[in-house]
């Protein structure tokens, strides 16, 4: 859904990427820094500093966007870099969801609605991973499967938006992510099926 905005996003981050390029920073370093920032954000979330956590997660997401731009600008696109980026993308989501699981597990007596949140988190994290896995499995079979209504950028934006409003509202955001992620999984399976017929 947000893929159409990628050129504008790239133009927005290009001045920042030139700063990092000037100092010779390798894109893989930024990929790892992004994971570290998400880790700090996750720890702060557990400690109930939700807005401060969101600051670190936002900077982590920017690092994730910068690494690809720098790799293209410097000609450092590599197979390993792509693997590292994909693995770290999954890690950042697991860290975010995992931090939420810990937070709601420790605070499930504060609000009655919190008691169901761990179940929502299970479906949200598994659905998110399955969206990515469906594409990876299709592309491993040389079948294009990139589209979907709720991809990683959209998931991160939704999580960030509901995190800004706090723990109570995050429950509804997680419910949305859980439901629409699984819809996206089935959507991608159907896309893979249609594209597999074209390859035969």
Image (cartoon, helix red, strand yellow):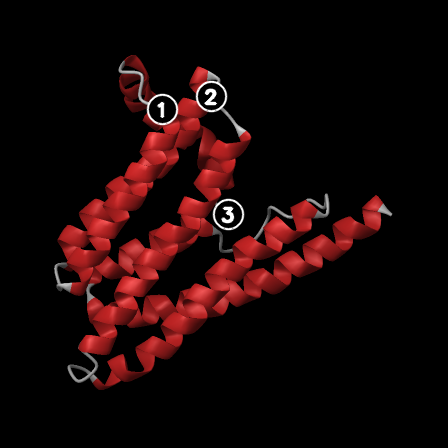
- Residue with the mark numbered 2: 76
Residue at numbered disc 3:
1
Q: Nearer the viewer, residue 47 or 84?
A: 84
Residue 62 visible, this orientation: no
Q: Is disc 2 surrounded by few (<14), some (14 to 19) or many (20+) residues within 10 Å? A: some
Q: Earlier in the sequence, mark 2 or mark 3?
A: 3
Q: Kindly state the secondary structure of the residue where label 2 is placed.
A: loop
What is the secondary structure assignment of the residue under circle 1?
A: loop
User: Compared with residue 128, is residue 139 higher up or lower down, i.e. above or below?
Assistant: above
Residue 191 at x, y = what percent? 69, 54
At which x and y percent is residue 196?
Answer: 78, 51
Residue 26's tag is 1
Say whether disc 3 or disc 1 marks the residue closer to the N-terminus.
3
| Residue plotted at (36% across, 68% down) | 174
Q: CA distance from mark 3 to mark 1?
A: 29 Å
Q: Secondary structure at mark 3?
A: loop
Image height of 60 relative to 16, above or below: below
Residue 154 numbered mark, or none: none
User: At x 56% / y 60%, what residue is drawn?
Assistant: 184
Tag 1–tag 2 contact (CB < 8 Å): yes
Residue found farthest to the top = 22
Q: CA distance from mark 1 to mark 2?
A: 8 Å
Let me know if residue 172 appears in the view. yes
Q: Residue at x 44, y 24 (%)?
A: 71
Q: How many marks?
A: 3
Q: Earlier in the sequence, mark 1 or mark 2?
A: 1
Is 105 on the left or on the right of 132, as rendered?
left
């Amino acid at each position: 859904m947000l893929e159409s905005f990628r050129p504008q996003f790239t133009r927005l981050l290009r001045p920042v990427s030139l700063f990092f390029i000037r100092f010779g920073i390798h894109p893989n370093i930024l990929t790892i820094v992004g994971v570290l920032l998400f880790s700090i954000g996750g720890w702060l979330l557990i400690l109930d500093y939700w807005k401060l956590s969101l600051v670190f997660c936002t900077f982590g997401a920017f690092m994730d966007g910068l690494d690809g731009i720098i790799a293209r600008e410097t000609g450092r696109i590599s197979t390993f870099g792509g693997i590292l980026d994909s693995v770290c993308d999954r890690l950042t989501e697991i860290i975010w969801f995992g931090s939420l699981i810990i937070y709601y597990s420790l605070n499930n007596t504060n609000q009655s609605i919190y008691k169901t949140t761990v179940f929502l988190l299970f479906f949200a994290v598994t659905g998110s991973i399955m969206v990515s896995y469906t594409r990876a499995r299709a592309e491993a079979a040389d079948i294009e499967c990139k589209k979907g209504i709720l991809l990683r950028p959209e998931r991160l934006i939704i999580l960030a938006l509901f995190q800004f409003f706090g723990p109570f509202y995050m429950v509804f955001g997680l419910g949305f992510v859980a439901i629409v992620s699984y819809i996206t999984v089935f959507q991608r399976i159907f896309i893979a099926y249609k594209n597999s017929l074209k390859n035969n």
